[in-house]
Amino acid sequence: MLRPDYPIKTDRLLLRPFTAGDAADVWAYQRQPEVARYLLWEPRDHRQTQDSVEQMAGETELGAEGDCLSLAVVSPELDAVVGQVELVWHSEEHRQGEIGYIFNPDHQGKGLATEAAREVLRLGFEGLGLHRIIGKCNALNTASARLMERIGMRREAHFVQNVVVKGAWRDELVYAILRSEWRQRV
């Protein structure tokens, strides 16, 4: 079980549960075609974003495998949500999890996603006691692949045309890091 003490502070960010009041900040990026391009969904309208935020607002702890911890990434300097990170608990027996992240393009290129993703790895390894954490991305999403490499994950697989997304076959990259590898980096 993982129930973090909120807010979680990093050098430049706060990670906390989503609230209904975050919908406008989240819509600022979920509506953008360049954000949705590599995701399973199309750009979202305001109602779809409100529904998304409502769902994420309930994902505040990991109590059992299959649960997802979704956190708003807040820039205290801007007093705004600049992105979202998540940790999914895949297997209790095998101590496996998966990270994910989406950031507003207006705030990319500043290391914020890297900082938030590193904190999610820490939550998974220290807070939940995971042995292995993976991350996946569309093979064309080179920015996401580079982020996973920056946080110490290694590419383990390139699946060719393994899933249909938005009516087209897509290649997928899978990255992973073990707890022992993560410890060497911190």
Image (tube, helix red, strand yellow):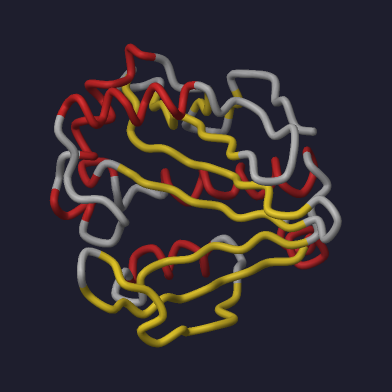
Which of the image's four quarters has the C terminus? bottom right
Q: Is residue 53 above or below residue 149?
A: above
What residue is drawn where x is 30% and y is 53%?
109
Along the viewing direction, whichever of 73 and 157 lies nearer the viewer? 157
| Residue lying furthest top | 21
At 46% from the left and 76% from the top, the residue drawn is 173
Seen from the viewer's position, the closer of residues 68 and 179 is 68
Q: Is residue 38 above or below residue 155?
A: above
Coordinates of residue 101 in the picture (x, y in percent): 44, 48
> Going 47% across and 84% down the picture, which residue do you hit?
158
Q: Quadrant of the N terminus?
A: top right
* Corner quadrant of residue 49: top left
Residue 26: give x, y in percent of width and height. 28, 30
Q: Residue at x 43, y 27 (%)?
A: 55
Front-most of residues 10 and 178 = 178
Residue 139: percent from left, percent from top: 36, 76
- The reply, left or right, for residue 67 in relation to residue 15 is right
Considering only vertical position in the picture, is 168 above or below 101? below
Q: Nearer the viewer, residue 89 or 135?
A: 89
- In x, y percent, where is residue 38? 28, 62
> What count of labels does the image hold?
0
